[in-house]
Image (cartoon, coloured by chain):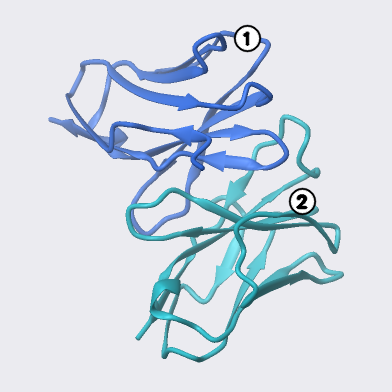
Chain colours: A blue, B cyan
Amino acid sequence: DQQVKQNSPSLSVQEGRISILNCDYTNSMFDYFLWYKKYPAEGPTFLISISSIKDKNEDGRFTVFLNKSAKHLSLHIVPSQPGDSAVYFCAASGNQFYFGTGTSLTVIP
Amino acid sequence: DSGVTQTPKHLITATGQRVTLRCSPRSGDLSVYWYQQSLDQGLQFLIQYYNGEERAKGNILERFSAQQFPDLHSELNLSSLELGDSALYFCASSVTPQGGQETQYFGPGTRLLVL
């Protein structure tokens, strides 16, 4: 049973525009959410996180939004750059970490 | 560089064989996690150790086992290997056991190919 879902396997965005990656979860007990970025042949790299007591966290070009009532979080990247092209995983923390299946982002120059 | 190291980077072996994957956590981290990523799949949590003791178990097969040593490095043992065990195996570490708002830091992974 997939407790964290990323329903878009891929996303293409023009350089300079906004990238929005989405993630849904099923367990209302999750209290901490993270986004990881993964390049080919490398391990996932921590990007940004958000506690369930917040609805927004911002770090430079990256902002994560959390909608607890909808059990939905999203990652906004503004402006998108070609170096952002990677697979993005969302994760939720409960008694263990649960990861989504990832969204492959391509930023077109 | 996350500070988490994994060896070997690549491993090719045959069905029925046994392999050992090794992970050294970041300095100061007491928790080690193992994940499997198969083709087009997300990261599947296998097992967690904290300061030498098993802390949590995920979707780990009985053919797989792990341990964490006094120096905090960890090994994942995969036995009676099947073709379907071919995957990327990641190790991650964190300072505390799960439950806090802890970030896991991942190693570069070991790519296992079972022929």
Residue found at x 38% / y 40%: A102
Q: Residue at x 59, y 64 (%)?
A: B5
Q: Residue at x 77, y 32 (%)?
A: B100
Q: Considering depth in this image, is B18 or B82 the residue closer to the camera?
A: B82
Q: Please provide percent x and percent y for residue B92.
A: 62, 53
In this picture, residue B89 sits left or right of residue A88: right
B100 sits to left or right of B11: right
x, y (%) of residue B18?
Answer: 56, 88
Disc 1 marks which amino acid? Lys
Determine the residue located farthest toward the front in the rendered image.
A1
**B24 and B65: which is toward the camera:** B65
Is residue A71 depicted above or below A3 in this figure? above
Which label lies toward us, 2 or 1? 1
B35 sits left or right of A74 in the view: right
Disc ID at residue B7: none
Decide: few, some or many residues near mark 2? Use Cα within 10 Å; few <14, some 14-19, many ≥20.
Answer: many
Position in image of residue A13 (x %, y %): 18, 25
Look at the picture and state if B57 lies above or below B115.
Answer: above
Is label 2 in a helix, a strand or a loop?
Answer: loop
Mark 2 and mark 1: span between their CA atoms?
27 Å
In the rendered structure, the residue with mark 2 lies on which chain? B
Residue highlighted by disc 1 = A54
Q: Is residue B15 above or below residue A101?
A: below
Label 2, on which residue? B29
Using the image, name the chain to which the residue with label 1 belongs.
A
Residue at left offset 69%, top offset 34%: A94
Question: Residue A2, percent across and down?
Answer: 49, 40
Label 1, residues with CA under 10 Å away: few <14, some 14-19, many ≥20: few
Vertical comparison of B91 with A33: above or below:
below
Residue type, numbered disc 2: Asp
Q: Secondary structure at mark 1?
A: loop
Q: State the count of labels.
A: 2
